[in-house]
């Protein structure tokens, strides 16, 4: 069993930055790839980024590539999403999730555990 708790969301003006954290419980953090998704009101949950078990591979959606950076610290059992140059269209609830492997990483149903989400609001 893995429990994931996101933090770091908030309100920021366009062009600003936020860093989200996802703290995991349990002993098996390094056995999972960690992903970030987001869901805006009235829209489906969409993939943002994923990092492999030891951080060797990362993937991003086209909408955040070059602005967001995913990372992880397996000792602290925490994944991070550094978000720079934020835009109003980045406004959403952000979720972290764990997955075995990085294949088919945009498919939400292949993720095993999810956090409760943290709200990010970007004003213009």
Image (spheres, rainbow, N blue to C red):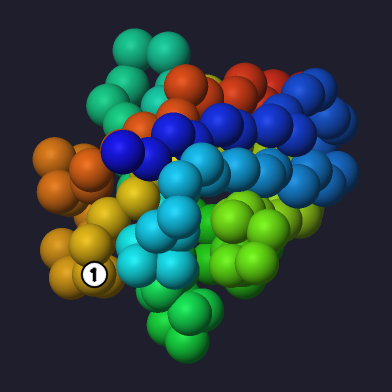
Left/right of residue 29 with respect to residue 11 in the rendered view: left
Up/down of 84 relative to 101, above or below: above
Left/right of residue 8 with respect to residue 45 in the rendered view: right
Quadrant position of residue 112: top left
| Residue corresponding to mark 1 | 101
Residue at the top extreme of this rendering: 42
Percent x, y of residue 37: 41, 42
Up/down of 101 relative to 26, above or below: below
Residue at the front extreme of this rendering: 27
Q: Residue at x 58, y 67 (%)?
A: 74
Q: Residues within 10 Å of mark 1 (few under 14, many from 20)?
A: some
Percent x, y of residue 93: 52, 24
Percent x, y of residue 71: 61, 67
Quadrant holding the N terminus: top left
Q: Nearer the viewer, residue 107 or 91?
A: 107
Q: Residue at x 23, y 62 (%)?
A: 100
Left/right of residue 110 with respect to residue 19 in the rendered view: left
Left/right of residue 74 with respect to residue 32 in the rendered view: right
Quadrant position of residue 78: bottom right
């Amino acid at each position: 069993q893995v429990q994931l708790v996101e933090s770091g969301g908030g309100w920021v003006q366009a062009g600003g930055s936020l860093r989200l954290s996802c703290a995991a419980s349990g002993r098996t953090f390094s056995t999972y790839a960690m992903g970030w998704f987001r869901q805006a009101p009235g829209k489906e949950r969409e993939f943002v980024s994923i990092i492999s078990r030891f951080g060797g591979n990362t993937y991003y959606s086209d909408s955040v590539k070059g602005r967001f950076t995913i990372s992880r610290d397996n000792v602290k059992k925490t994944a991070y999403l550094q978000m720079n140059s934020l835009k109003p269209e980045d406004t959403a609830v952000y979720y972290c999730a764990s997955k075995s492997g990085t294949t088919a990483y945009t498919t939400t149903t292949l993720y095993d555990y999810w956090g409760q989400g943290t709200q990010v609001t970007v004003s213009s």
